[in-house]
Image: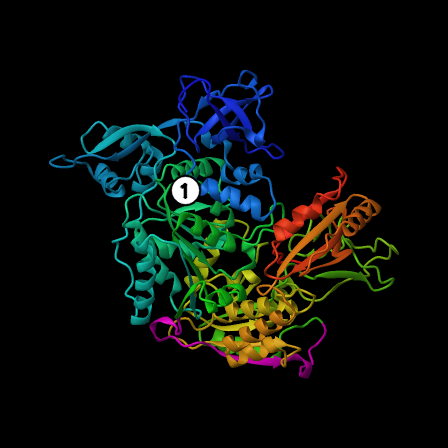
Amino acid sequence: MRNKTTRVRVLLPIQGLSQLDYAVGEDLVLEPGDFVRVPLGPRIVNGVVWDEGHANGKDVAFEKLKPVGEKINLPPLAKATRRFVHWVSDYYLAAPNGILRMTMPVPAALQEPPTKTYYRRGVNDGVKLTEKRQSVWDAIRDGEMLSAKELGERAGVSDAVVRAMANTPALDAVTSSVDAPYLAPDPEHPGPTLSDDQQGVADELCTAVTAHAFKPILLEGVTGSGKTEVYFEAIAQALREPGAQVLVLIPEIGLTSQWLGRFEERFGVRPVQWHSDLGQAERRRAWRSILKGEARVVVGARSALFLPFQDLSLIIVDEEHDPSYKQEDGLCYNARDMAVVRAHLGEIPVVLASATPSLESVQNALSERYTHVKLKSRHGGALLPDIRAVDMRQVKLPAGRWLSPDLVEAVHQTIQDKEQALLFLNRRGYAPLTLCRTCGERLECPNCSSWLVEHRLAGRLMCHHCGYNQRLMTACPSCENENTLVACGPGVERLAEEVRHEFPDARILELTSDTLTSPARAAAAVQSIDDGDVDIIVGTQLVTKGYHFPNLTLVGVVDADLGLSGGDLRAAERSFQQLTQVAGRAGRAQKPGRVFIQTHMPENPVMQAMLSGNQDAFIAREAEARKLHHMPPFGKLAALIVSAPEERDALMHARALAKAIPQAEGVQVLGPAPAPMAVLRGRYRFRLLVKATKRINMQKYLSAWLKRVPKNNAIRLGLDIDPYSFM
């Protein structure tokens, strides 16, 4: 691309734009993947050179093309990343501009960051240091660069001591970018001793890494079996290759302080983090470091999959079954599935780790698309907990009480033995419903088809779907009677209230998304449990995310049937996974664990599988039911969600879509019908569900269908391929 007649196609991370042609001046040498600044109307915008030639097949005269403004001084976007953008765009029928925007989420990262003075170790041979200067020397590691403030705080001295010490050979002052480089993890840093079973699995993962080829591996291991330590060895093997980068996807990244601590113990430093709680400066630092290949290991939430890695050599998807890997708004992608795609495009291994693998992954393993490796026992001789069901149909509890006598007695005994108990209820807030006992009015969200949830600690009524909230009321808004509003059903706050009443001397900690509002708060809560400052933990699904508390020996599940209601085809699978994960928090060290599951349906297959411990039989049963009805993973699904501010507009467009349905063998379209969440954020919603056999090209079918119906600016059409939620 060296002569002035050359044109390039540039993809801009701006929704609604296609690729655009630009002219390349004689002074520019551009290649696919280069970041550039180009004119767009009166603006100058950032983009990526996508290819040579003509955009959209249009032969626009060269003299009419605007020239590329400048090439940005950064490494190009890797070919595998560009291919990934196209693959995701094609699969989810989404514009590539939006996918590129996910790859370029920090516009400031394309600017050179400001500079700052840092300090690093110099030469200490024969230099006589005062006590304070010696503390500075001891506080900084070889290769590390810190600001005067950071180094002074670490050494317990003033900034002035640090600056003065820079006048000696022992400390160097360096003017560098404010985005200090990350310390590289050390693969040879001593780690824990693995058992024979763990070492065998680790060796297999390491062999896949050194093969430099696509290989999806399902790493299944019972809770507490040490899956993390095993895949750490694969990470270490990848890091032995110069420049190799590793991505670890973890659900709820802001709440994984224990995982980060274990990583630091194994590799000497913490990995680069990527999640929504990072400030813009840290996101800029991380993004540029990843693009330059300097960030060797990145741990992040699902969006980290789209980061611009230069030499991605291994992907780990921890807790691969977790539903939070499915994005439900905007681009409805599944990060677990797309991680496998990204590994395939980059010809690298991907490890999917879980104690309760998804049915999709199990079927891929059974069909030998995935290699399946297992850890069948807990590490260090720890035993799986003893699980028993409490039939709540046989238990008579006072009004406003939710803990059975058997569970209460077990908690008392646990505290007496100076051990810790966990009480689990997967429902936020104080109560899921508030109604008037005089007129029967139920308090609803004004924007959604949902009840307002009482959050007594915050003094608010909240909608968990759109975020609407208001103060708690004393009078019914319908009949205006005072003090007639009553809370119905338990939320985790109400459960905690009962626990405080039942165990007044116990030290109680609530672990929910409403109390752990930042990674710092989550880390502090975890540390207090580790330090033995907590007797009883009351929590929601956050407590199922892989925490390891050695002194936690009792788990009580309140309202275990909660996830079994509704028409979700994955309801049984999700409930089993969640119950298994929360039960797995008990007895992970030398002390035996016990689990009490309070249920009104002890005969349910999920409860029977929990009691028998026969996970394989449960998965086989689920697979047979799905196969019988041609449901995923034995068939394909796609959902079309039509929404509009006016119900009539949404319904008419949904009916127009229904009239235009292409007829095809192996395809069935259900609907349109009001969505279970018929109103969301003030928009009326109708759904159509496409059910197809595996041989159908769903993308081709949907594209042909949507072309038959004119677009309407008042209508929003959401497309969810491989839906998880049916709301």
- The scheme the figure's colours follow is rainbow
Residue 281, visible in the rendered structure: yes
Q: Quadrant of residue 153?
A: top left
Say which residue appears at 54% left-offset and 25% top-offset: 21
Q: Is residue 523 magenta?
A: no
Give whichever of 230, 214 is nearer the camera.
214
Inspect this view and state whether residue 406 appears: no
The answer to whether 724 is drawn above or below residue 140 in the figure is: below
Task: Name the residue furthest left.
Answer: 126
Mark 1 residue element? loop
Tell me the residue at 76%/39% (across/down): 712
Q: Residue 630 location in percent, x, y? A: 63, 67
Q: Residue furthest bottom?
A: 394
Locate residue 408: give its quadrant: bottom right
The quadrant in which the C terminus is found is: bottom right
Quarter of the picture holding the N terminus: top left
Q: Which residue is mark 1?
A: 309
- Please identify the quarter of the rendering in which residue 359 is found: bottom right
Q: Nearer the viewer, residue 200 or 459?
A: 200
Q: Is 502 positioned to the left or the right of 420 in the image?
A: right
Q: State how many labels appear.
A: 1
Q: Residue at x 46, y 38 (%)?
A: 283
Three-letter residue code for mark 1? Phe
Q: Is residue 245 above or below residue 509?
A: above
Find residue 167 and report its horizontal and vertical position in percent.
22, 27
- What are the residue bounds of the magenta stretch? 375-399
Q: Nearer the viewer, residue 648 or 563?
A: 648
Percent across and percent down for residue 622 are 58, 72
Q: Position of residue 574 (x, y in %)?
A: 58, 66
Horizontal side of 230 relative to 546 (left or right) equals left
Q: Residues within 10 Å of mark 1 (few under 14, many from 20)?
A: many
